Structures are given as structure tokens and as C-alpha cells.
């Protein structure tokens, strides 16, 4: 059986294309088959005049599959990192296909010509951000747990993370990208990573109402009145998350950021510094450069840069590393395979990372005109 048949459920009702991620035991982590199914479905609906809008949600592990309590509550925990680990060790080209097709999907969503509504309830991390940040309406709830936690596995915030994190206010993007900290729905709205925060018990009614609008014009009016305006108080949380608290992340190097946090002396700052010291020192340096570069890039150029970066993460030729020797495979091993939570980073200390280790990550491994994402507009 094609896993996409059961792991991605799609239907059209009332002119709205409805997608349910249905891999709840894996927190709806995206497999290659799921990415391919999503890409094919959205391309078909883009060109189908009978579909005027799209909505996406994730199922969860509570209740009987398909029952009301099993819908919503768990959006998407990201890409299937166990697959990444297995494919990297085996030299499986499917790993390359995954990232090329996933980034193509991310670009399509950001540029989708029809309304695309993302119900970002529950866990929204990594690849889950990639299939929701480009939505024309991003709905979060009090249950939303949002993060780009890739530095914890020796990776970087991809799926367009450079693009959307760098456009957060102040230096919030650097903070989220480097630490991988989890934020709630109200924080997501305050920092421009969601449009509205609604009570989770309202999601079934909102989902059902999408199918009764009949046209793009009616849908836009309904969103403005019944979703955004009706829950406008969800945008009032901005003051609780003062962007000035993240000024340290505007400094020019990882060492200076950590030093400033430790010198601040507050418990939250010291805790943040401790988090950074547990992340991959090499990838912290790469990620800081990624966010700074992406701030002036188009989405397409950012995704091409990220496709270069991810290639170097698994095949780090300039450091003579690949497979189990790569930072990313080691990070996944420690978190998801052996679960000892003790990754052996190389270099082990922030101070030991040199510019010569970082700069080659930003050189494309493909000759001009042959980049796998060269056709992104």
C-alpha cells in the first residue's frame, strides 16, 4: 500500500480542498511519501477551478481514528528524522529527494494562488512550520507548541526558516533559530508567526464553516469578521514578549551572545546561555550566519541556500565528514536513536569553531545552472 493513501487524507467539500495529516503515532512527522502526496495534491488543486481554497490540519493519538477528539490537537512535529539517520548511513539518494521536494512544497505554499488555511494546533515544529508559515491564514490555539529545534540535532532551521525567522521583530529570529526554544500560540501571534489565536474547542466549527462559504470573496469576508476580528484580543499579548529581552542575540558572534547572556545574571538569561552551550557549536555559527544572510533574501534564494546547507550537513566534505561522522547524524543518534541525549559535537566548544569551518557551508555544491531548486521563482 502507498503510505500516502493513509498518512495524507484529502477530500474536496464545498469547493475547499481539505487535508488531514494522519500519522499521529509519529506526531505527523513528514515522510518522503507524505511530502510527495502533499506536493501533488496542492499542484492539482491549484489548477482545479472547482477548488477555490485549501485547509490543512493534523490528527492526534487521542480517541478512535477519525473521531472528533482525534482531529486537531497535533499538527506536525517536522520531518522524519529517523529516516534521515537511516538514509544518511546507507547513502540513500531518497534523502536528497526528500529535501528537494520538501523545499519545493514550502515554496509552493508561500506562493499559493488560492487561500490556504493552516490549523496549527498542538505541536508545530520544523517541517510543520514549513507547511504552515506560508499560509494566508495561520490559526494557533492555547495548545500550540511551536519551535524550530534543529540546532539540537546538529541541523539548522530549514524549510524556509531563514526567511520567516529573520522577519520576526528585533532579534527574536536569532533567538528562536539558535536555541530551538518552544513558544505558545500567543507568542507566535505577537512575533508574526501566526495570525490569530483561537480557543481549541472552536476549531471543528471553524473547519466546518470553511465549506459553507462558496467563494473566495465570501471566505475572505468570513475570515476577516469571524476569525480575525472575533479574536482580535489574541494580538494583544505583544507587550508580554518584549523584543528588547533578546538584544543579546543581535551581537556579532556566538561567543559574544553567550557571554552577554551569562553576564546579564538573570535566571532566564543564564538558562538560555546554558541551552546554547548544549547545542552543536558548529551549527550555532552556521545558523547565525544563515539568519543574517536570509534577512535580505527572497524566499526562493533562501530555500536554495538552505538546500546547499542541508547537503553540507550530511556530506560535510570540507571537514571530511559524512554519514555517522556528520554533526546531524550524531545529533539524531543522541536524540532519537540511542536516546542517550549526549551528542558528541565536533568541535566540542563554541570557542573552537573557526571561520574556515563555517564559510564552506554557504558555497553551493552544485555548478551554476544545475541547482536542484534552480527553477524556483
Image (cartoon, rainbow, N blue to C red):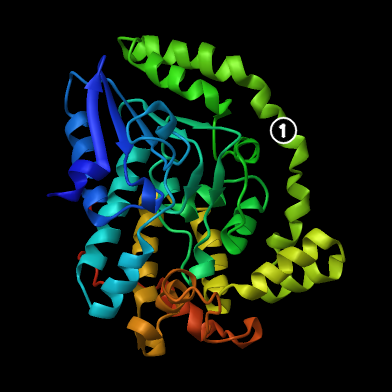
Tell me where residue 192 appears, x and y as whole percent: 58, 38
Question: Alpha-carbon neighbours of circle 1 within 10 Å: few (<14), some, or many (≥20)?
Answer: some
Q: Does residue 132 lie above or below 195 as drawn?
A: below
Residue found at the far right of this picture: 265
Instruction: Name which quarter of the figure residue 230 lies in.
Output: top right
Q: Secondary structure at mark 1?
A: helix
Q: For mark 1, what is the residue? A: 237
Whether residue 245 is visible to the viewer of this picture, yes or no, is yes
Tell me where residue 331 appears, x and y as whole percent: 47, 74
Tell me which residue sits at (67%, 68%) in the image: 275
Q: Nearer the viewer, residue 121 or 71?
A: 71
Tell me where residue 269 appears, x and y as whole percent: 79, 62
Q: Does residue 316 lie above or below 162 as drawn?
A: below
Tell me which residue sits at (53%, 78%) in the image: 282
Does 130 sit left or right of 243 as displayed? left
Tell me which residue sits at (44%, 39%) in the image: 62
Q: Nearer the viewer, residue 17 or 306?
A: 17
Tell me which residue sits at (65%, 40%) in the image: 187
Tell me where residue 58 appears, x and y as whole percent: 39, 38
Amino acid at each position: 500500500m502507498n503510505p500516502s493513501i493513509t498518512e495524507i487524507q484529502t477530500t474536496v467539500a464545498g469547493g475547499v480542498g481539505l487535508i488531514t495529516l494522519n500519522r499521529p503515532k509519529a506526531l505527523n512527522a513528514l515522510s518522503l511519501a507524505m511530502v510527495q502526496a502533499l506536493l501533488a495534491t496542492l499542484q492539482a488543486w491549484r489548477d482545479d477551478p472547482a477548488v477555490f481554497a485549501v485547509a490543512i490540519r493534523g490528527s492526534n493519538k487521542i480517541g478512535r481514528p477519525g473521531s472528533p477528539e482525534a482531529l486537531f490537537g497535533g499538527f506536525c512535529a517536522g520531518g522524519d528524522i529517523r529516516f534521515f539517520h537511516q538514509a544518511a548511513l546507507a547513502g540513500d539518494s531518497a534523502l536528497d529527494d526528500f529535501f528537494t521536494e520538501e523545499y519545493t512544497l514550502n515554496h509552493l505554499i508561500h506562493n499559493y494562488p488560492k487561500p490556504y488555511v493552516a490549523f496549527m494546533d498542538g505541536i508545530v515544529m520544523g517541517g510543520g512550520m514549513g507547511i504552515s508559515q506560508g499560509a494566508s491564514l495561520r490559526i494557533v490555539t492555547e495548545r500550540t507548541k511551536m519551535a524550530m529545534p534543529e540546532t539540537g540535532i546538529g541541523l539548522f532551521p530549514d524549510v524556509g526558516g531563514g526567511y520567516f525567522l529573520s522577519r520576526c521583530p528585533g532579534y527574536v529570529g536569532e533567538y528562536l533559530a539558535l536555541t530551538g526554544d518552544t513558544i505558545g500560540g500567543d507568542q507566535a501571534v505577537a512575533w508574526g508567526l501566526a495570525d490569530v489565536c483561537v480557543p481549541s474547542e472552536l476549531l471543528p466549527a471553524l473547519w466546518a464553516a470553511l465549506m459553507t462559504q462558496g467563494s473566495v470573496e465570501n471566505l475572505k469576508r468570513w475570515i476577516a469578521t469571524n476569525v480575525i476580528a472575533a479574536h482580535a484580543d489574541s494580538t494583544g499579548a505583544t507587550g508580554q514578549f518584549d523584543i528588547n529581552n533578546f538584544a543579546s542575540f543581535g551581537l556579532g558572534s556566538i561567543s559574544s551572545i553567550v557571554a552577554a547572556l551569562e553576564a546579564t545574571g538573570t535566571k532566564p538569561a543564564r538558562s538560555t546561555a546554558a541551552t546554547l552551550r548544549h547545542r552543536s557549536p558548529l551549527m550555532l555559527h552556521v545558523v547565525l550566519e544563515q539568519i543574517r544572510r536570509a534577512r535580505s533574501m527572497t524566499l526562493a534564494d533562501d530555500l536554495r541556500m538552505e538546500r546547499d546547507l542541508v547537503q553540507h550537513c550530511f556530506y560535510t566534505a570540507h571537514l571530511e565528514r559524512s554519514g555517522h561522522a556528520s554533526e546531524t547524524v550524531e545529533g539524531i543518534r543522541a536524540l532519537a536513536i540511542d536516546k542517550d541525549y549526549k551528542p558528541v559535537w565536533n568541535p566540542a566548544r563554541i570557542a573552537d569553531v573557526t571561520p574556515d569551518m563555517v564559510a564552506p557551508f554557504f558555497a553551493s555544491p552544485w555548478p551554476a545552472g544545475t541547482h536542484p531548486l534552480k527553477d524556483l521563482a
